[in-house]
Amino acid sequence: MGFFNPHATDFILNLFWYVLHWLKFYAFTRRSLAFNWLSGSLATMVRLLRTKRALRREPRHCL
């Protein structure tokens, strides 16, 4: 799981401290999924916008 066990009673934190913990120990490490998520989201958005632009130029006709 990494650096902490969220079910341990000695490590119960509020949202602010969980975010700080994540930024300190996970955000900029190889274990972080944030950068993979961001790059995947941007690639998906670019592809959707290209598809939208192509459909505006040449709409498909249904039979």
Image: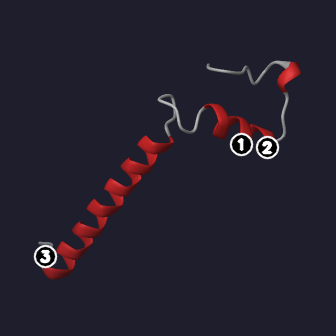
Disc with the residue nearer the chain's start (3 vs 1): 1
Quarter of the figure that contains the C terminus: bottom left
Quickly name the residue at label 3: 61
Residue type at the position of mark 2: Leu
Residue at left offset 75%, top offset 24%: 6
Numbered disc 1: secondary structure:
helix
Residue type at the position of mark 3: His
Count residues near mark 1 (Cα–Cα under 10 Å), then give few for <14, some for 14-19, many for 20+.
Answer: few
Q: CA distance from mark 2 to mark 3?
A: 51 Å
Residue at left offset 29%, top offset 69%: 49
Quarter of the figure that contains the N terminus: top right
Q: Quadrant of residue 57?
A: bottom left
Query: How far from the left and from the top, in percent, is residue 43?
Result: 32, 54
Q: CA distance from mark 3 to mark 1?
A: 49 Å
Query: How far from the left and from the top, in percent, is residue 52?
Result: 26, 72
Residue 28, placed above or below residue 7: below
Query: How far from the left and from the top, in percent, is residue 39?
Result: 38, 49
Residue 40, placed above or below residue 14: below
Q: Quadrant of residue 12?
A: top right
Which one is closest to the eye, mark 2 or mark 3?
2
Q: CA distance from mark 1 to mark 2?
A: 6 Å
